[in-house]
Amino acid sequence: MADGLFTWPADQPRLIGSRCRTCGVVTFPAQGSCPRCTSVDVEERLLGRTGTLYTWTVQGFRPKPPYAGPEDFEPYGVGYVELPGEVRVEARLTVADPDRLRIGLPVELVIVPYGDKVTYAFAPRDGSGADRRTR
C-alpha cells in the first residue's frame, strides 16, 4: 500500500485527495498537478466518507504477480464509488456477493486488514448487514 492515501489511525478515516485551485477538479489519489488544466496550484483535500456505488464487479480469481496476494485467495468486490460533488474512486468493497451489490448502493469508507497492513474499502450502509470492519 502506498503511504498518504488515507488518514489513519482515525475514528473517521478519510481518503486524501487533491483539488486544483485553478479549475476546481478533484483527484484521488492526491496529485502534484491538475490532470485537466496542468496547473501545479493544487491543495490537499480530505474527501467525503460516504458515496454511492457507481459500478462494480467481483474479482473471482487470484491476480497474476506482482498483484497475486495471498495463496488462500478469496473473491472480493471491487468498484467505483462516486463521492458526490468530488470524484469517483476505485476501491475494494467489503462485500463479494453479487446479490448484495447494486449500482446506486449507498456505501461508506472503512479500513480493513490487508496482509500485515491495512487498506481502505467501502462497505454498504443501507442496512443490508454487510461487513463494516474498521480496525
Image (tube, rainbow, N blue to C red):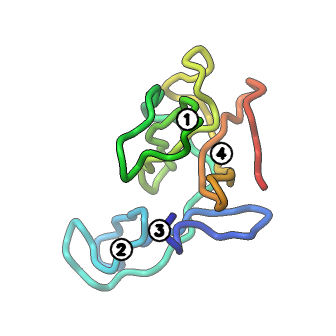
- How many marks are shown on the rendered structure? 4
Q: Which residue is mark 4?
A: 108
How packed mark 2 is, by other alpha carbons closer than 10 Å (few <14, some 14-19, many 20 or more), is some
Distance from Cα at disc 2 to Cα at disc 3? 7 Å
Q: Earlier in the sequence, mark 4 or mark 3?
A: 3
Q: Which residue is mark 2?
A: 31
Distance from Cα at disc 3 to Cα at disc 1? 30 Å
Kindly indicate the quadrant of the structure image that contains residue 55.
top left
Q: Is residue 113 left or right of residue 78?
A: right
Q: Which mark is residue 17?
A: 3
Q: Residue at x 66, y 39 (%)?
A: 123
Q: Which residue is mark 1?
A: 73
How packed mark 4 is, by other alpha carbons closer than 10 Å (few <14, some 14-19, many 20 or more), is many
Q: Nearer the viewer, residue 106 or 15?
A: 15
**Residue at disc 1, secondary structure:** loop
Return the residue found at the far top.
99
Q: Is residue 38 left or right of residue 105?
A: left
Q: Nearer the viewer, residue 70 or 78?
A: 70
Q: Earlier in the sequence, mark 2 or mark 4?
A: 2
Distance from Cα at disc 4 to Cα at disc 3? 16 Å
Distance from Cα at disc 1 to Cα at disc 4? 24 Å
Pointers 4 and 3 in contact (CB under 8 A)? no
- Which amino acid, mark 1? Phe
Return the residue found at the far bottom.
41
- Which amino acid, mark 4? Glu
Depth-wise, is mark 1 or mark 2 nearer the camera?
1
- Which amino acid, mark 2? Gln
Return the residue found at the far front.
71
Q: Earlier in the sequence, mark 1 or mark 4?
A: 1
- Which amino acid, mark 3? Gly
**Residue at disc 4, secondary structure:** strand
Q: Nearer the viewer, residue 5 or 108?
A: 5
